[in-house]
Amino acid sequence: MPIYTRTGDKGDTGLFGGGRVPKNHPRVAAYGAVDELNSFVGAARAALPSDGRLPGLDEALARVQAECFLAGALLATPADRQAKLGPAFAAGLPASAVKRLEDEMDAWDAELPPLKNFILPGGGPAGAALHLARAVARRAERGVVELGASDAVPDGVVVYLNRLSTWLFVAARWANKRQDRVETPWSGLK
């Protein structure tokens, strides 16, 4: 049985729970942006070193990927079809997800020097990949907010994406510090 279905060849796609919309619908853009974010988080995981200097980060990123998958599935399901979701999705994002992100950020931030300037994304491979994922998280958040202007958005998704983008920023700084990679402060145009 082939993986392709040909059902989207005319520019529409099926939603989770039933129904079809054009591929440029705000709902598709929102869950597509979360899927893209999930891929960038996976790329960040692939960029992590195996030398033990970033303890727990791979596991935390794996959890974030699972949460992004869940958020994407929720976004792919119109509000009137949420009841059709199976047990893995019906409860929505865990209420503890945002608090866990905050707790992890606080722990990492305690190891970092205070920010006195804007910094340019970069550092080592892991830090740069986390900064890139952070930028994609912001885009995903904007897409979900755009969807929310015209349709219902599942509870907690905007807050989760907002917190996740900051979490990725702090994780990038922490990874760079732990790996002795220098952050480049923005010093304006010369």
Image (tube, helix red, strand yellow):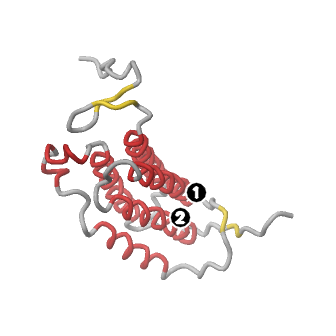
Farthest residue, direction front: 150
Packing grade of label 2 (10 A; few <14, some 14-19, many >=20) is: many
Horizontal placement of 106 versus 118: left or right? left
Write the residue at 31% across / 58% down: 63
- Precedes in sequence: disc 1 or disc 2: 1
Farthest residue, direction right: 190
- Residue 82: which numbered mark, if any? none
Write the residue at 40% across / 68% down: 55
Amino acid type, residue under disc 1 in the picture: Ala
State whether residue 183 is above or below residue 44: below
Where residue 89 sits in the image (x, y, percent)? 20, 50
Which residue does the numbered mark 1 point to in the structure image? 128
Amino acid type, residue under disc 2 in the picture: Ala
Disc 1/disc 2 C-alpha distance (Å): 7 Å
CB within 8 Å, label 1 to label 2: yes
Q: Nearer the viewer, residue 165 or 20?
A: 20
Horizontal placement of 181 versus 145: left or right? right
Where residue 131 sits in the image (x, y, percent)? 55, 58
Q: Nearer the viewer, residue 29 or 39?
A: 29
Packing grade of label 1 (10 A; few <14, some 14-19, many >=20) is: many
Which quadrant of the view contains residue 113? bottom right
Which residue does the numbered mark 2 point to in the structure image? 172
Q: Quadrant of the C terminus?
A: bottom right
Horizontal placement of 173 versus 137: left or right? right
Which quadrant of the view contains residue 24? top left
SS of the residue at dot 2? helix
Write the residue at 38% across / 53% down: 148
Q: Quadrant of the N terminus?
A: top left
State whether residue 181 is above or below residue 135: below
